[in-house]
Amino acid sequence: MIKDIVKATIILVILAQVLSCYNFKEVSCEEAADGVRLDSCNVVVSEFSKNEYKFYLHGIIPGTNTASTFKKTNYTWGYWFVDKIAKGDTVVKKGGELLFYIYKKDTVLVFPFECDGKIYE
């Protein structure tokens, strides 16, 4: 019993020391915008996730019938539009832009990149 307590204490002390040495860095809105600006996709959706933390779109590129997959982890921008995507929609994110388009049969939804209440272009 005492050996288990000593082992647990040693593990906790080592873990605390390791974690205290790690420098957690929060990404600024500008850095996040720069990262998202690089993304691009153009896909008629056949499969998708409803989760912005494991964002996934799969389908075909319009006009080519070539399979395409867009996959991102922690795509928190997706919070604003992930629940708007449906099978058959055409989803477009042009490289260099901070707009996400969802083309439906009768409507186009446009989602600008927003961070801390500011819309980035």
Image (cartoon, rainbow, N blue to C red):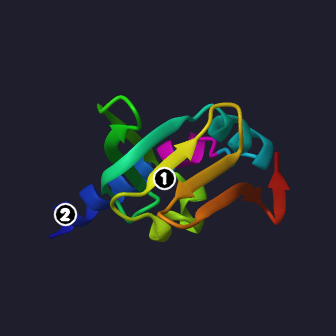
Q: Position of residue 7 (x, y in %)?
A: 25, 56
Q: Amino acid at mark 2?
A: Asp
Q: Position of residue 88 (x, y in %)?
A: 35, 58
Q: Amino acid at mark 1?
A: Ala
Image quadrant holding the C terminus, namely top right
Q: Is residue 76 left or right of residue 10?
A: right
Mark carried by residue 29: none
Q: Is residue 54 left or right of residue 119?
A: left
Quarter of the image for residue 116 reads bottom right
Q: Position of residue 86 (x, y in %)?
A: 38, 65
Image quadrant holding the N terminus, namely bottom left
Q: Residue at x 65, y 36 (%)?
A: 35
Q: As rendered, which of 66 and 114 lies closer to the eye?
A: 66
Magenta span contains residue 23: yes
Q: As rendered, which of 115 and 26 lies closer to the eye?
A: 115
How much space separates mark 1 and mark 2, taking CA atoms?
Answer: 18 Å
Q: Residue at x 58, y 66 (%)?
A: 107
Quarter of the image for residue 114 reads bottom right
Instruction: Verify CB contact (< 8 Å) between mark 1 and mark 2.
Output: no
> Mark 1 packing: few (<14 Cα in 10 Å), some, or many (20+)?
few
For disc 2, the marked residue is: 4
Decide which of tag 1 and tag 2 comes sooner along the chain.
2
For disc 1, the marked residue is: 16
Q: Which residues are magenta?
A: 18-24
Determine the secondary structure under disc 2.
Answer: helix
> Mark 2 packing: few (<14 Cα in 10 Å), some, or many (20+)?
few
Q: Residue at x 59, y 67 (%)?
A: 80
Q: Residue at x 48, y 53 (%)?
A: 16
Count all numbered tags in the image, as a single digit. Answer: 2
Q: Is residue 58 left or right of residue 34?
A: left
